[in-house]
Image (cartoon, rainbow, N blue to C red):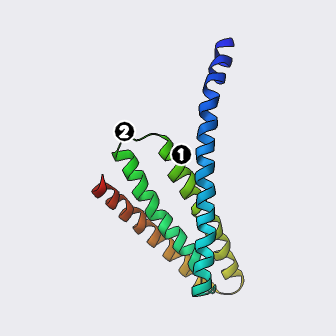
Amino acid sequence: MRSSARRYCTERPEQVGKYLVVGIGGFMGSIARFWLAAFVGQRMGTRFPYGTFLINATGSFLIGFVMTLLTEKTNLSPNWRYLIPIGFIGGYTTFSTFEYETLRAIQDGQFTIGTLNVVLSVLVGFLMVWTGAMVGKAVA
């Protein structure tokens, strides 16, 4: 019992560091998402959720790219995984917003907009993850 308590105490600062790195990344990703969604919404309007769509597409590219780099370059610190894909991209992407905007469009009788949002987001998101992974392999 004592050894497990001792092990917990010695591992705890490392755990706090991981949470801090994830939190910093999430903070930066959330700010980036908020800024980009507002920027795109002001320029393109809000009839179709362009900001959310763009964020999900670029987030898909980024996670494909970053995870490929992080797995190909094995000598990088594990903290990069906590900071970028878990923290930043996790805070940046907006899947729950995507789902809510799709629901609202359908509830408002805009079935075509809702369906288009789902189809484009899934297809473009997959294409962007694949493209990001290919670019990551080329860079690594």
Image-based side of 60 in relation to 104, left or right: left
**Tag 2 residue:** 75
Residue 124 lies, with reference to residue 108, above or below; the image says above
Q: Please, what is the three-letter code of the amino acid marked with disc 2?
A: Asn
**Tag 1 residue:** 82
| Residue that appears at 58% across and 76% down | 51
| Residue that appears at 42% across and 54% down | 66
Place of residue 60 in the rendered image (x, y in percent of width and height, measured from the top left): 47, 63
- Residue at the left extreme, as displayed: 138
Q: Earlier in the sequence, mark 1 or mark 2?
A: 2
Image-based side of 132 in relation to 1, left or right: left
Q: Which residue occupies the foreground of this view, 88 or 128? A: 88
- For mark 1, give the secondary structure: helix
Q: Which mark is residue 134?
A: none
Distance in Å between CA atoms under marks 1 and 2: 15 Å
- The quarter holding residue 62 reads bottom left
